[in-house]
């Protein structure tokens, strides 16, 4: 086991940036890309007004579009993770899994995907080939066809090796009606497994930190797990994958959109010891650390046990657990009940604790 004091002394903080500076900045800052309050403000106060009548105000990670009675899910995402390869994955498989999971969160089976690469001049072809192979293997594993794409190159020093954009289309299960407006008081909140692994894996690799054991990203496709959940016939009101901003951002977004309060049983949160140790060392809240292979679901109380049983039978949900519920109190807020019997507010992150995480 490593010595946290010695590890703290060896951290080289030179070059670190604050992901969430003052929110009244006249310029784009790292916090605007963090998936927290600054991202939401950018969308609400700049993009939506600028788009005007062309914008659908239901902006989300995936849209459900009805075409001739067939419901299709549509999602796009960009991946700028640093470093490009990290314990447990790379920018390539992350790009596929991230878009697959956005489609899955509205109850869709992914069908086809586009890929767009923005490459920095001077990037080694061997490194690019490794990432491209990982992307292709992840697509095969998810049953997705890569049907179109694009490649651009930017000047040396004006990129960071490889940026990837993926856009996916999926077929929504006819039994699924998954949206925040369906969340009501009494719903049970379930998470599919351990939280914080992706964020800590990337940070440990990026900063050369060690936490007594290797931490690997949880990047993985979740559409198979979702299919098992829907297959129970349960009334699943909402699902989200807690990526940027972690569980804290996801639950705050759901609470605000649904107009409910959410309470969390803090001792029940599945936080691995290595994640807890890393967050203690770095002064981070595990609830705000990114995940790339987990989902949070709000389920009708009578169906919670059935959904939990189905999740635990699937490899991606073997450690699924109930972490809280929805209430009429403190609407639009998330509150955690601690092991000592007190409560604390779980705020929406302003920016992101760990920038460039996906």
Image: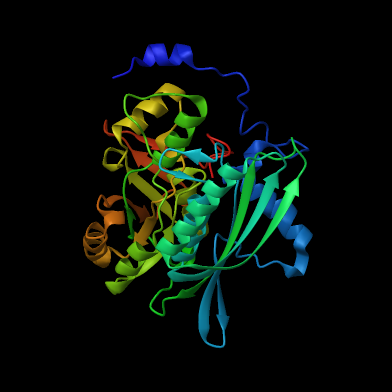
Residue 156 visible here: yes
Residue 30, compared with residue 108, is above or below; it is: above
Residue 208 % position (x, y) = 47, 24
Residue 259, compared with residue 156, is above or below; it is: below
Residue 256 % position (x, y) = 51, 54
Residue 70, compared with residue 295, is above or below; it is: below
Residue 22, compared with residue 6, is above or below; it is: below
Left-right relation of 64 to 200:
right
The residue lying toward the viewer, choosing from 98 and 146, is 146
Residue 196 visible here: no
Q: Residue at x 46, y 47 (%)?
A: 333
The residue lying toward the viewer, choosing from 147 and 169, is 147
The answer to which quarter of the image holds residue 240 is: bottom left
In the displayed orientation, state which residue is furthest to the front: 126
The residue lying toward the viewer, choosing from 172 and 23, is 172
Q: Residue at x 62, y 28 (%)?
A: 18
Left-right relation of 243 to 276:
right
**Figure quadrant of the N terminus:** top left
The answer to which quarter of the image holds residue 336 is: top left
The residue lying toward the viewer, choosing from 47 and 328, is 47
Residue 335 % position (x, y) = 40, 42
């Amino acid at each position: 086991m490593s010595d946290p004091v010695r590890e703290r002394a060896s951290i080289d903080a030179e070059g670190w940036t604050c992901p969430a500076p003052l929110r009244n900045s006249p310029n784009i800052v790292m916090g605007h890309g963090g998936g927290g309050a600054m991202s939401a403000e950018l969308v609400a106060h700049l993009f939506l007004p600028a788009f005007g009548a062309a914008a659908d105000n239901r902006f989300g990670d995936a849209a459900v579009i009805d075409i001739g009675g067939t419901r299709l899910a549509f999602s796009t995402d960009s991946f700028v993770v640093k470093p490009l390869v990290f314990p447990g994955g790379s920018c390539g498989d992350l790009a596929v899994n991230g878009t697959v999971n956005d489609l899955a969160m509205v109850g869709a089976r992914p069908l086809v995907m586009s890929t767009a690469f923005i490459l920095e001049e001077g990037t080694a072809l061997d490194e690019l080939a490794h990432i491209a192979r990982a992307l292709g293997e992840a697509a095969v594993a998810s049953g997705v066809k890569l049907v179109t794409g694009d490649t651009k190159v930017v000047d040396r020093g004006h990129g960071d090796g490889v940026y990837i954009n993926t856009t996916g289309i999926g077929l929504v299960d006819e039994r699924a009606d998954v949206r925040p407006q369906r969340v009501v008081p009494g719903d049970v909140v379930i998470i599919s497994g351990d939280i914080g692994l992706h964020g800590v894996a990337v940070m440990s690799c990026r900063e050369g930190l060690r936490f007594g054991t290797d931490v690997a990203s949880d990047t993985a496709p979740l559409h198979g797990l979702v299919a098992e959940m829907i297959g129970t016939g349960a009334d699943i009101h909402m699902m989200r994958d807690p990526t940027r901003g972690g569980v804290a951002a996801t639950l705050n977004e759901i609470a605000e959109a649904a107009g409910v309060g959410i309470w969390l049983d803090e001792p029940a949160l599945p936080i691995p010891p290595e994640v807890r140790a890393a967050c203690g060392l770095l002064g981070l809240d595990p609830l705000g650390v990114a995940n790339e292979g987990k989902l949070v679901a709000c389920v009708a109380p009578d169906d919670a046990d059935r959904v939990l049983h189905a999740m635990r039978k699937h490899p991606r949900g073997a450690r699924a657990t109930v972490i809280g519920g929805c209430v009429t109190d403190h609407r639009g807020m998330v509150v955690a009940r601690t092991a000592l019997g007190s409560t604390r507010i779980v705020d929406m992150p302003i920016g992101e604790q760990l920038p460039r995480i996906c």
